[in-house]
Image (cartoon, rainbow, N blue to C red):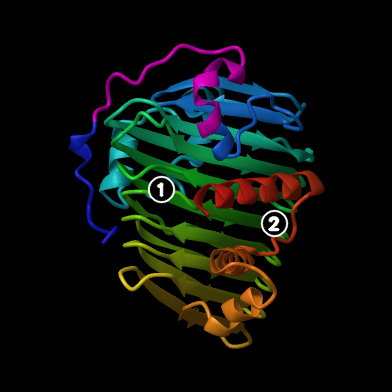
């Protein structure tokens, strides 16, 4: 399964250096890959952009006062206080992948909304692999200071010429008091890429963290299990994921929310479809550790072939009284009567199946600003169109 260890040394750390560019449009040969990852080379309706190509940060620009966009390396040099954020909520010795990034980092992004800065226009960031057999070891830090708001569209993608690669991505998010981060990620990999993200979020009083994840292209293996810690009173976290796995894709994914603050809330919603020989493990874990916390977990899977597999693992852990945790989990097939119903109304069988799949994957993502909601829907439609 995808949880098997990747041989890190099989991928190289040299040969992935590039010079800076003055515009994202300079990478026009990769326009299709960038668009598929939610990145607009024209930067229309964006508050800023970040692009890392292999091992080099080639573009980083903020268009809004109070929004800071730097490479992690530059940020460490600029801000001495950043030491207290690095490897604070993702331990450097967590596993072989975190150790590799800690010992041999190849950049990553630093995104920060200053205190009181509300940035509703999306910021776009992209981690791009353009060289074959490269390993990309990135460490990302995202901070929303008190009373700020940050909306991020981030895409991880690979050039069509790449047959094999390894992406190791460590991300640490900090949501301060009364702040909000919305993080919408599109993974647009290919069938020869191994992917090992490791992410954690720390949320203070009245803070909000919303994570949306879209995955619809093949990957060799992907293993991730982001954790949000609602440490503050009345803090909130939400993970929503849409996964369409086909070919020989191997996915081991899930989310965890730890409710430590009094009155905190958590929600995990996932939709997973497996077809061809794809295999999906979909996990969800809600942990209640404080008074008056509430959480809900919903995992739904749809099987489209006998040679695919979905394993759903919902977990609830209550460690105090006066908490409310719940879950729903279901894995099944497309109901024949639904297909017959649509065919009776003039649709072909393929059209009927396509409509049912679209309906199954369509999650009403709440809490997004209008512009980001529009961009998220566009990304969803574009990726779905690509595979259907």
Q: Nearer the viewer, residue 217 or 168?
A: 217
Residue 246: x and y in percent read 40, 57
Q: Is residue 5 toward the left or the right of residue 361 in the image? A: left
Residue 296: x and y in percent read 60, 77
Can the viewer see residue 341 in this picture? yes
Marks 1 and 2: in contact by CB < 8 Å? Answer: no
Badge 2 crowding class, 10 Å Cα cut-off, few under 14, some 14 to 19, many 20 or more, is many
Q: At 36% across and 33% down in the image, what residue appears?
A: 136
Label 2 or label 1, whichever lies nearer to me, is: 1
Q: Nearer the viewer, residue 345 or 70?
A: 345
Q: Nearer the viewer, residue 17 or 172?
A: 17
Q: Mark 1 highlights which residue?
A: 197
**Element at badge 1?**
strand
Q: Mark 2 highlights which residue?
A: 207
Q: At 60% across and 55% down in the image, what residue appears?
A: 211
The magenta stretch spans residue 28: yes
Residue 85: x and y in percent read 51, 41
Q: Is residue 221 above or below residue 52?
A: below
Extreme residue in the bottom direction: 321
Q: Is residue 315 above or below residue 109?
A: below
Give the quarter of the image for residue 47.
Answer: top right
* Numbered badge on residue 276: none
Q: Is residue 335 above or below residue 44?
A: below
Numbered disc total: 2
Residue 35: x and y in percent read 58, 34
Can the viewer see residue 230 in this picture? no
Q: At 60% across and 12% down in the image, what residue appears?
A: 22
The magenta stretch spans residue 122: no
Magenta segment, which residues? Answer: 12-33
Q: Is residue 282 toward the left or the right of residue 339 in the image? A: left
Q: At 48% across and 73% down in the image, what residue appears?
A: 301
């Amino acid at each position: 399964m995808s949880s098997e260890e990747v041989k890190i040394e099989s991928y190289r750390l040299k040969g992935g250096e590039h010079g800076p560019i003055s515009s994202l449009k300079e990478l026009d040969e990769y326009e299709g890959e960038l668009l598929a990852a939610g990145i607009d080379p024209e930067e229309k309706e964006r508050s800023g952009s970040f692009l890392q190509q292999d091992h080099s940060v080639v573009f980083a620009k903020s268009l809004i006062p109070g929004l800071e966009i730097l490479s992690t390396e530059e940020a460490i040099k600029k801000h001495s206080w950043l030491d207290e954020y690095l490897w604070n909520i993702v331990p450097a010795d967590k596993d072989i992948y975190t150790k590799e990034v800690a010992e041999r980092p190849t950049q990553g992004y630093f995104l920060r909304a200053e205190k009181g800065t509300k940035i509703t226009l999306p910021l776009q960031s992209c981690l791009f692999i353009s060289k074959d057999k490269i390993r990309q070891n990135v460490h990302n830090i995202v901070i929303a200071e008190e009373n700020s708001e940050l909306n991020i569209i981030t895409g991880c993608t690979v050039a069509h010429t790449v047959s094999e690669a390894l992406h190791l991505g460590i991300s640490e998010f900090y949501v301060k008091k009364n702040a909000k981060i919305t993080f919408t990620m599109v993974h647009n990999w290919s069938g020869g890429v191994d992917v090992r993200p490791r992410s954690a979020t720390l949320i203070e009083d009245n803070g909000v963290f919303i994570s949306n994840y879209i995955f619809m292209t093949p990957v060799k293996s992907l293993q991730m299990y982001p954790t949000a810690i609602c440490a503050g009173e009345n803090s909130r976290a939400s993970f929503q994921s849409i996964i369409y796995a086909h070919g020989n894709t191997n996915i081991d994914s899930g989310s965890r929310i730890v409710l430590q603050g009094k009155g905190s809330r958590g929600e995990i919603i996932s939709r997973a479809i497996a077809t061809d020989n794809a295999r999906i493990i979909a996990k969800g874990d809600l942990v209640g550790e404080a008074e008056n916390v509430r959480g809900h977990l919903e995992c739904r899977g749809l099987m489209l072939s006998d040679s695919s597999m979905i394993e759903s693992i919902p977990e609830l852990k209550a460690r105090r009284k006066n908490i409310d945790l719940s879950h729903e989990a279901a894995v099944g097939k497309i109901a024949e009567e639904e297909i017959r119903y649509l065919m009776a109304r003039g649709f072909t069988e393929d059209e009927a199946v396509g409509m049912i799949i679209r309906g199954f994957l369509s999650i009403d993502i709440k809490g997004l600003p209008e512009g980001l909601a529009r961009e998220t829907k566009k990304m969803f439609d574009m990726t779905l169109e690509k595979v259907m």
